[in-house]
Amino acid sequence: MKQPLLGFFLIGLRTVMAGGAVEGSLSVDAMKPAPSRPGYVAPQTKAPVQKAEAAPAIVYLEREDEKYPRTRMGEKVSIRQSGYQFRPAMVAIQTGAKVEFPNLDDEFHNVFSYSKAKRFDLGRFRKDEASPPVLFDKPGVVKIYCEIHQHMRCFVVVLDTPWFVTTDGAGRFSLKNIPPGEYWLRVFQPSEKLLQERVTVTEGQTTKVNLSR
Amino acid sequence: MKAHHWFIVMFCCAAPLHGQATLDKLDDLTRFNSEALGLHADLSFMTDATLFAAEQPEQGLLSTDDRVFFAPRLMTFLDVQLGDRITLHGQMRVDRGFDPGAARGGQVRLDEYYLQARLWRKDEVNVRIGKFATAFGSWSRRSLSWDNPLITAPMAYEDMLPVSDALVPGGLAGFAARRDMPDNKAEWLPILWGPSYATGVSLFGRVDLLEYAFEVKNASISSNPQSWDGVQDGFHTNPTFTGRVGLRPAPEWSFGTSFSHGPYLRESAAALLPAGTSVNDFTQTTWGLDAGYAHGKWQIWSELIAARFEVPRAGGVEVLSGFIETKYKLTADLWAALRWNQAAFGDVPGLTTEWDRNAWRADLALGYRVSERVQVKLQYSMGDKRGNDAEGHHLGAMQLTVRF
């Protein structure tokens, strides 16, 4: 047991201390439009439904041996319900991390998912009422909805790798402190499309990648 | 292969649907979105495969003399959004009748179609014109199989009363005798007939904690589905006025009061009426209270409905019916639902006997969401009309719903 722990420690230490970087840009697409609810059952809201934020793409590095330091499990992630939208609409977390879903609207939301990687239903909870953090303990894409407001959707991309980022407004990304080696650079687009490309990370150097084509 | 064997086949097909990639693709293919035109169109589908096993004569609006009855249904919804103010909606159904068994050989209907416009900046004032669900009460909003925690409707929305829109009693004795007869599902009426998709115009909206809806339609809330289509059948009687005012003092609570008033007889009954009267003289007046509570895993709804029918040659008869319904999510995908229904009848005018048997019914259901597109429900109902064995006491039902 000691040897694997030591191994993970050393990998983690290398991640913090040194490594290379991967930078690049890509064309981020859009989420599929939300389905309509049949007519009269669409709830009237107390305040206007605000426009959803443009979702970023998730860029991450994976390697063949699938051994990763568990350095980002403790990150606190929060997906707010605000203006009858999930904000942000797309997040990435490492397997084992927890996500909170605070309600900032004056009406109920009911956050749920039936995805294979995580099935949960928080029930109806009101503004400022603490909802239990949800543990995401399996990797995969988790599609999250509100049972009351069907247009509301977001993605939680649960990854074993700790080397992931979200793109900025221009589709740029930068992954730093990556241990040298061969990787698959993968991109999860808001449209649920997956892009991938082989990259080599070299100590002290930045690998440039252009996925805009 | 017998009809209900199809249900078993469909039920077995539910497991592979868990992956739902095909349903997702179908859903994507039937959507059109153009930011430039401000147009969003969505064609969506919902299929139900429902199996009823009922003690005869069967409860509610189910019409069959089979011990086991299979009721498949395909619903097609078209929703078009033009800009942020105009909405078009249509709902077409293919099934074995609006109520299971009403058209055993199969039927295609346009059950709902309307044009809706938002007249004010937010949701304060909206107008809707067409054929659409009633504003009365709160059940219509969860009447579709996907939203209904149970399979059947509450008793007030489906239990037949010995009052008819076509059969005019010859006298008081003839009317009083109906209480001992089995339900005549082709001719009698419930207090409200399901969501009552009658034709008309509605003004509705929400202002902070208050919500309102007022509508004028071609048929009463108890009217038979055959009377609902004003475009196809025209407007033959005075209109029915219906409204609801609701209050949401907190996210957990909702309260509402509803009313409806209008003639309930069909034009065809005019020839049978006492001299000097018309169908417009015989009205249904209904008043309702509804309350809802939701928090965490719980959802509770209740309604109390009082109705008065003016019956030719008999006078005014009254009924009070209500239900309390609760849904509790046992896990993320499994829920239990329980509904208690009760109805009490006033006396036949001038007599000391009720015009129908007082009744109760308990509905118990378990539901399971396989995915966000597939759902399975099981229901058992037990009911009794006091001292009357003319209706079965037990009903079992199973329903598979797939939407895409």
Image: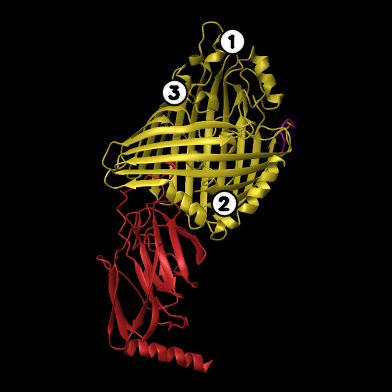
Q: Residue at x 61, y 49 (%)?
A: B377
Q: Is residue B390 magenta?
A: yes
* SS class, disc 2: strand
Q: Rate crowding at label 2 as few (under 14), some (14 to 19) or many (20 or more) other CA atoms within 10 Å.
A: many
Q: Which residue is mark 1?
A: B272
Q: Amino acid at mark 2?
A: Gln
Question: As rendered, which of A38 and A65 lies closer to the eye?
Answer: A65
Name above or below for residue A6 compared with residue B177: below
Q: Rate crowding at label 1 as few (under 14), some (14 to 19) or many (20 or more) other CA atoms within 10 Å.
A: some
Q: Residue at x 47, y 80 (%)?
A: A66
Which chain is indicated by disc 3? B
Q: Mark 1 or mark 3, which is nearer to you?
A: 3
Q: Which residue is mark 2?
A: B375
Q: Is residue B303 left or right of residue A125?
A: right
Q: Which residue is mark 3?
A: B231
Q: Amino acid at mark 3?
A: Val
* SS class, disc 3: helix
Q: Rate crowding at label 3 as few (under 14), some (14 to 19) or many (20 or more) other CA atoms within 10 Å.
A: few
Mark 2 and mark 3: span between their CA atoms?
Answer: 35 Å
Using the rendered view, name the quadrant where residue A54 is placed: bottom left
Mark 1 or mark 3: which comes first in sequence?
Answer: 3
Question: As rendered, which of A174 and A48 lies closer to the eye?
Answer: A174
- The chain assigned the colour red in the figure is A
Q: Which residues are magenta?
A: B389-393
* SS class, disc 1: helix
Q: Is residue B11 left or right of residue B238?
A: right
Mark 2 or mark 3: which comes first in sequence?
Answer: 3
Using the rendered view, name the quadrant where residue A169 is placed: bottom left
